[in-house]
Image (cartoon, grey):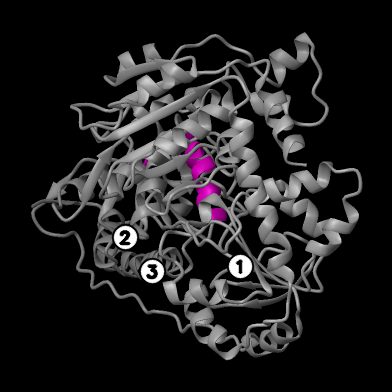
Amino acid sequence: MRYTDIPAAHLVVAYCKSAGIRQVVLSPGSRNAPLVLGFTSDPYFECFSVVDERSAAFFALGLSQQSGNPTALVCTSGSALLNYYPAVAEAYYSRIPLLVLSADRPVYKIDIGDGQTIRQDGVYGNHIGFQGNLQQDVTHAPASIRWEGGREPGDPRSLHEMQARILAENEARVQAALQTAMEDHLPVHLNIPFEEPLYGTIPEPPVEIRPTLQPRLPEINGEGEDLLGHWQEAGRKMVLIGSLPPGSLSDAVVERMAADPSLLVFTETTSNLHHPEFFPSIDSVLAPIERSGQPAPSFEALRPDLLLTLGGMVVSKKVKQFLRAYPPAGHWHVGPHNANDTFFSLTGHVRSDADHFLGDFLPRTQPDTKSGYRARWSPVRDAYRKRRTAYLGQIPFSDFSAFEAVMKAIPDGYMVQLANSSTVRYAQLFDMRPGNPVFCNRGTSGIEGSTSTAVGAAHNYEGPTLLLSGDLSFLYDINGLWNDRLRDDFRVIVINNGGGGIFRILPGKEESDAFADYFETVHNRDMEPVCNMFGMGYRRAASAGELEAALDGFWDPSGRPILLEVRTPREINDRILLDYFDFLT
């Protein structure tokens, strides 16, 4: 085994190894050669080469989404690390750990007209858990360094004293970055200047390093006792669960919530929680009230005395509007990290793992057997399920019916990666089986990176994966398929309605050339050429019968990944969706 001869590069690689960071996503370049050589020469690391840095970052995000551990991202200098930014922001708001390692020119080559050079230090601003600029080594290529004042140190001992101080300061920054990534589940950034030559290797490490990471003491939060009193006084309690990894709540906690008739549990598709007493498809409850002639009495009956939120971002726009217009008397969030005041009514935060806290908290509460809160709304949930079935039996082929057919056909064991925009919102209207874990990039809710994230997540998932995407989301990130780790059991279903169909649903839509060109972005692209480019199997459906036939055998083992393109009629999808809510009213 050989080592890079640049101390800063070896320092970073050694600390990653000591911290248990095994997966490293590399994008080609020259300035990052010391890091590339350091990671790829050690068989401990699993290294991936992804050319497109934006795709590389989302691929890394998918790896960390499934492993729970930081993935290292390595890029060259210049604009390369700017392409990481969308995934860094997504990781920041979704609490997914990433370690961004950007190679840089020496500081004296910044802003003098040198090529492939930008101001890299602190480039991620407010969307990073930690950022540090390592100091440049002075014992590597000292003859090439432009010394401050124009003279290099004359005594070799002073050079090594300087290097010892630099090494100590760099170690402190690397330690801080790794601890933030692992303990706070946030992306972190280390910017590392390298002087040429960059490709040197030696048989022994350039410096002796004994990496140490000092765990921080957990915060103590006693607000759970305050919550207990509010809980017992509240006759109507609502639990709203945003995105959570599968298995986040134990069966015992789920059953205790289900046993309290004063408790209404709203779950999102991305919550990965299921129980007959819970309320999925939140919009199917709220939209009919909203569209009725007199919504106020029903919304008042639904308004909780106490709101408890768990998990990450909430997809449903309607539940946000409802809880802002009809705020609870108290809103508590349970979670180890930040508490979002999404509904402008936050009164408390229990900074603890939700399962650990609720496992201790719920047995100390007394279920309110006299409350009619859940009894008032359970018939509403049961009714919308029956009405949904009736509605599906009378509508033409469309986005709505296509999503229902697809979601009903997904075999148990498939992980489902949802693209953003209309895809995740349609998915919220149907029931997902417990055997299908669901993920979506809801931190920033952008359409970029869905495919790349799914490919990365699929690599670390034991079973097969389905990416369910809209046409614009898929076309936006086709470089996500430019990856030699694409698994044969990876499946993609693209609902192609010929543009950004969600804009036809939003208020303010008008039929005009400007709307079609600049909002809906109408197009006639087919997905088959994309499949041919990346060696994927291809299927197509444009009717209910064709979709049923295309899904037959779609999930069977194959020698390559397969994409199914479902063409739906652009002009009627919005009307069918809005009519569904009227049908429920």
Q: Name the residue tied to disc 1.
A: 338
Give the camera-side residue of 581 and 147: 581
Q: Residues under labels 1 and 2: Cα distance?
A: 52 Å
Q: Quadrant of residue 313?
A: bottom right
The residue at the point 63 percent across, 52 percent down is: 382
Q: Name the residue tied to disc 2.
A: 154
Residue 306 included in the magenta stretch of the image: no
- Where is residue 539 shown, x and y percent of the image? 35, 17
Q: Secondary structure at mark 1?
A: loop
Q: Which residues are magenta?
A: 75-94
Q: Quadrant of residue 519?
A: top right
Q: Name the residue tied to disc 3.
A: 175
Q: Quadrant of residue 92?
A: bottom right
Residue type marked 3: Gln
Q: Secondary structure at mark 2?
A: loop
Residue type marked 1: Asn
> Is the Cβ of the residue at disc 3 closer than 8 Å to that at disc 1?
no
